[in-house]
Image (tube, rainbow, N blue to C red):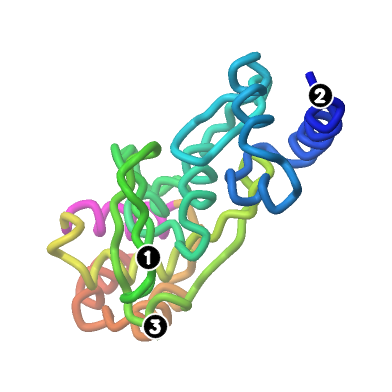
């Protein structure tokens, strides 16, 4: 192995000591050549978990790591709808694809792993209610509970209404959001007219 590649390999190890997963573009920017990456994969030091996305072979799998992988693949995306609901512990459904919101003109990634379900939102809806959670060492943007519920009630063609109502009921029962926070989110997210009767019925005896 040439000295230049040894030096790159050392830098590669240092990078993955600080990051759980990295994109090929990030590695190139850090001065790691494709040959060094390929050799590290061949030697079993790195795993190629999807197109252009790598992690160290000894990385411990975290519960929501698939969301971190999706966020790494789609840097401008936000975890949304059923995937956000599952992250917040408000549904037992585990979507087969990761729901991720992007802008109306943002680039959509080619099919790869993890499988994605892209939803395009206009600018006012896209940037509302974003929280950042660290998953597997990656800062992952996830919509808040009120924002997620608003999106689910606003998009009945994308998400079954029963799932939206289940999420609303769970948020109230688990006290993860107050009725006023949920109502504010629904009004800001254009879903108040649709959600209001359900919220009223679920809080009638509260």
| Predominant SS of the magenta segment | helix
C-alpha distance separating marks 2 and 3:
49 Å
The region drawn magenta spans 161-173
In the displayed structure image, the side of residue 204 where residue 103 appears, left or right: right
Q: Quadrant of the C terminus?
A: bottom left
- Mark 2, secondary structure of its residue: loop
Please state the horizontal and vertical placement of residue 36, each as a whole percent of the image: 68, 30
Q: Residue 200 appears in which quarter of the rendering?
A: bottom left
Q: Give the foreground label among 1 and 2.
A: 2
- State if disc 3 and disc 2 touch (CB < 8 Å): no
Q: Kindly indicate the quadrant of the structure image that contains residue 15.
A: top right
x and y percentages locating residue 118 in the rendered image: 30, 58
Residue 99 lies within the magenta run:
no
Residues 59 and 24: in front is 24
State the separation of the CA atoms marked 3 and 1: 15 Å
* 9 to 144, vertically: above or below: above
Q: Was residue 164 drawn as part of the magenta stretch in this picture? A: yes
For residue 123, the mark is 3
Q: CA distance from mark 1 to mark 2?
A: 38 Å
Q: To which residue does mark 1 refer?
A: 107
Find residue 158 and report its horizontal and vertical position in percent. 18, 59
> Seen from this angle, which residue lies furthest front?
2
Marks 1 & 2, CB-CB < 8 Å contact: no
Disc sitting over residue 2 in the figure: 2
Query: At x 20% / y 68%, what residue is drawn?
Result: 155
Picture layout, residue 26 above or below residue 44: below
**On screen, residue 26 above or below 60:** below
User: Mark 1: which secondary structure?
Assistant: loop
Q: Depth check: 102 or 128 in front?
A: 102
Report helix, strand or loop for mark 3: helix
């Amino acid at each position: 192995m040439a000295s230049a590649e040894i030096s790159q390999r050392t830098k590669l190890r240092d990078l993955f000591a600080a990051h759980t997963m990295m994109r090929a573009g990030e590695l190139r920017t850090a001065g790691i050549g494709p040959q060094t990456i390929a050799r590290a994969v061949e030697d079993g030091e790195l795993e190629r978990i999807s197109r252009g996305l790598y992690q160290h072979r000894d990385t411990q799998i975290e519960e929501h790591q698939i969301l971190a992988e999706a966020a790494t693949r789609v840097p401008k995306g936000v975890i949304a709808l059923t995937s956000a609901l599952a992250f917040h512990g408000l549904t037992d459904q585990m979507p087969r694809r990761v729901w991720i919101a992007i802008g109306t003109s943002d680039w959509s990634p080619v099919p790869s792993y993890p499988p994605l379900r892209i939803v395009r939102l206009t600018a006012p809806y896209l940037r509302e209610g974003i929280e950042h959670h660290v998953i597997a060492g990656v800062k992952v943007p996830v919509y808040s509970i009120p924002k997620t519920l608003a999106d689910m009630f606003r998009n009945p063609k994308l998400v079954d209404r029963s799932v939206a109502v289940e999420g609303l009921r769970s948020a109230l029962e688990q006290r993860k959001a107050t009725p006023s926070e949920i109502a504010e989110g629904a009004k800001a997210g254009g879903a108040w007219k649709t959600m209001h009767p359900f919220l009223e019925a679920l809080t009638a005896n509260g």
